[in-house]
């Protein structure tokens, strides 16, 4: 089947064909006709199968007629992350370029004022993350009573990020006559409950078994003798080097934001072209980093799972799992960043003795009995786990001191500053599941209180010892105040 057989109106079809697409993917072939017919759709497909186009194309077709009112968007797309929301916006611009549809993007890290101005003018398509959408609604800047089509993208990721209460609230604010398009890679029980509550007789479109990995991806593991992070970083560098010229670009996934910054900094120190991306970094820096990776200007993207879902970066040659994912479903989404659109890809995962439970869950989820193991020879007996740069690789300090490898004036300074600030801030922060972070903050607070309270430490200078009770009292010497001298004269 071709796109021109799906019954799209001419301008929408022209936009799709201009984008270089002639044949729809299985999810698009089944979901688009149902959406054009006005039915609710429940789409289940693994990442990289074209779900975004499966709902943007029929939405453009439907919205081609009509006009938006101030603060009353005609359609709403909810996405779990800022990056995914921005990608959906790009799809609307690409497929709807022959239509005069207005669009607004409500995500964090962007001025409220600019977003409010767009809403006041009226928008046909509103793309938002749940938190920022509710912020605007509670401020009275947005009404959802005019929603004709509503899309929930990456619903299982919404569940993982704790957005389900927000989703239920938003669905309750929209008219029951809306058309709902609901897409997810997996269907946990909580997601099933929501679809039963808010979707009306949906057309179920399932193009592949949930948690099934693509056959175009070569999957490998490296079994570590111990779970030492320094050893893991050294092993990661070895695996990257062994990839050789086959490594065009790659994504390194870590479970914690803190590890993302540490791994990125370690790779940079050893001369690798790497930058971090996670939710604690500034939005402008995150978007700039993703764009550099898409454009081929950045070789290694060190990421948390914020980059594991839905991002359309078609030519990723390698995925490296620095950590075995806690949720086995995330393994599928992580490695789904490579081997897309029929291309071949490679996924490598570092597995320590502490990861046995999670690794078994990955095998069970994917239906695999085993994964090919990489033989590194005597690497673990001879490896230097220090983070000292190897010979021949430039050090960051050399660029600051000048000489060979001196940084050119003004080059990438705008990017370097937010990267350094974001990485340092996030690396100092502990993750929520580390109780010692709270203890450290409480201890620091207590120490500060002790320093500010009275007692022996009051008045202490940093350049000298505190005064003890047995110390001799130091007098004025020759610098006696005049009023004391006057009193002595009167007494005499």
Image: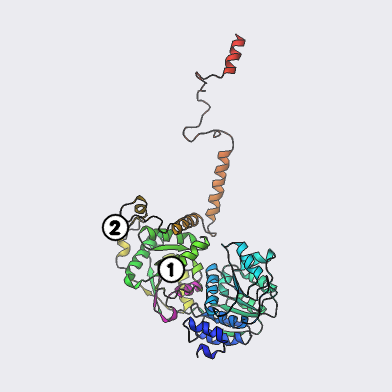
| The residue positioned farthest toward the top in the image shown | 492
**Which range is magenta?**
327-350
On the image, the x and y values in percent for residue 303 come to 46, 65
Along the viewing direction, whichever of 426 and 156 lies nearer the viewer: 426
Q: Looking at the picture, how far across and down is residue 254, in whole percent? A: 46, 65
Of labels 2 and 1, the one closer to you: 1
Residue 273, image quadrant: bottom left
Write the residue at 53% across / 50% down. 440
Give residue 418's position: percent from left, percent from top.
48, 57
Which SS class for mark 1?
helix
The residue beneath circle 2 is 391
Camera-nearest residue between 5 and 83: 5
C-beta proximity under 8 Å, tags 2 and 1: no
Tag 1 residue: 293
Q: Image point 48% across, 86% down: which residue?
A: 22
Task: Kindly identify the residue that appears in the image at 60 percent across and 64 percent down.
Answer: 114
């Amino acid at each position: 089947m071709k796109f021109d057989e799906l019954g799209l109106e001419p301008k929408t079809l022209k936009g799709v064909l201009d984008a270089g697409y002639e044949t729809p993917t299985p999810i698009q072939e089944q979901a688009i006709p149902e959406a054009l017919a006005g039915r609710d759709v429940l789409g289940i497909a693994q990442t990289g199968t074209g779900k975004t186009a499966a709902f943007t194309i029929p939405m453009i077709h439907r919205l081609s007629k009509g006009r938006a009112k101030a603060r009353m968007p005609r359609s709403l797309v909810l996405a779990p992350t800022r990056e995914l929301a921005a990608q959906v916006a790009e799809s609307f611009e690409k497929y709807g370029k022959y239509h005069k549809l207005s669009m607004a993007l409500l995500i964090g890290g962007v001025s409220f004022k600019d977003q409010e101005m767009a809403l006041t003018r009226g928008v046909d398509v509103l793309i938002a993350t749940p938190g920022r959408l509710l912020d605007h609604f509670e401020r009275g800047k947005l009404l959802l009573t005019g929603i004709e089509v509503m899309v929930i993208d990456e619903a299982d990721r919404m569940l993982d990020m704790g957005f389900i209460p927000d989703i239920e609230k938003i669905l309750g604010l929209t008219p029951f006559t809306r058309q709902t398009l609901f897409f997810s890679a997996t269907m946990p029980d909580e997601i099933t409950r929501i679809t039963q509550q808010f979707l009306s007789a949906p057309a179920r479109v399932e193009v592949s078994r949930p948690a099934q990995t693509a056959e175009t991806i070569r999957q490998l593991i490296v079994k570590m003798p111990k779970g030492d992070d320094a050893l893991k970083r050294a092993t990661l560098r070895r695996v990257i080097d062994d990839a050789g010229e086959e490594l065009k670009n790659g994504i390194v996934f870590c479970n914690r934001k803190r590890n993302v910054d540490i791994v990125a900094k370690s790779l940079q120190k050893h001369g690798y072209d790497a930058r971090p991306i996670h939710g604690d970094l500034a939005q402008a820096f995150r978007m700039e980093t993703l764009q550099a990776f898409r454009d081929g200007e950045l070789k290694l993207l060190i990421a948390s799972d914020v980059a594991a879902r839905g991002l359309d970066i078609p030519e990723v040659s390698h995925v490296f799992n620095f950590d075995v994912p806690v949720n086995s479903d995330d393994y599928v989404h992580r490695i789904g960043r490579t081997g897309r659109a029929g291309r071949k890809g490679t996924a490598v995962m570092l597995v320590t003795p502490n990861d046995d439970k999670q690794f078994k869950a990955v095998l069970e989820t994917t239906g695999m009995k085993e994964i090919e193991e990489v033989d590194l020879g005597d690497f673990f007996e001879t490896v230097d786990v220090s983070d000292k740069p190897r010979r021949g690789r430039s050090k960051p300090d050399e660029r600051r001191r000048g000489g060979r490898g001196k940084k050119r004036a003004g080059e990438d300074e705008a990017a370097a500053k937010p990267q350094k600030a974001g990485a340092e801030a996030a690396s100092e922060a502990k993750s929520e599941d580390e109780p010692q972070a709270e203890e450290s903050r409480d201890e620091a607070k207590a120490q500060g209180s002790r320093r500010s309270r009275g007692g022996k430490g009051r008045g202490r200078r940093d350049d000298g010892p505190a005064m003890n009770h047995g110390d001799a009292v130091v007098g004025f010497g020759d610098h006696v105040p005049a009023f004391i001298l006057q009193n002595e004269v009167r007494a005499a």
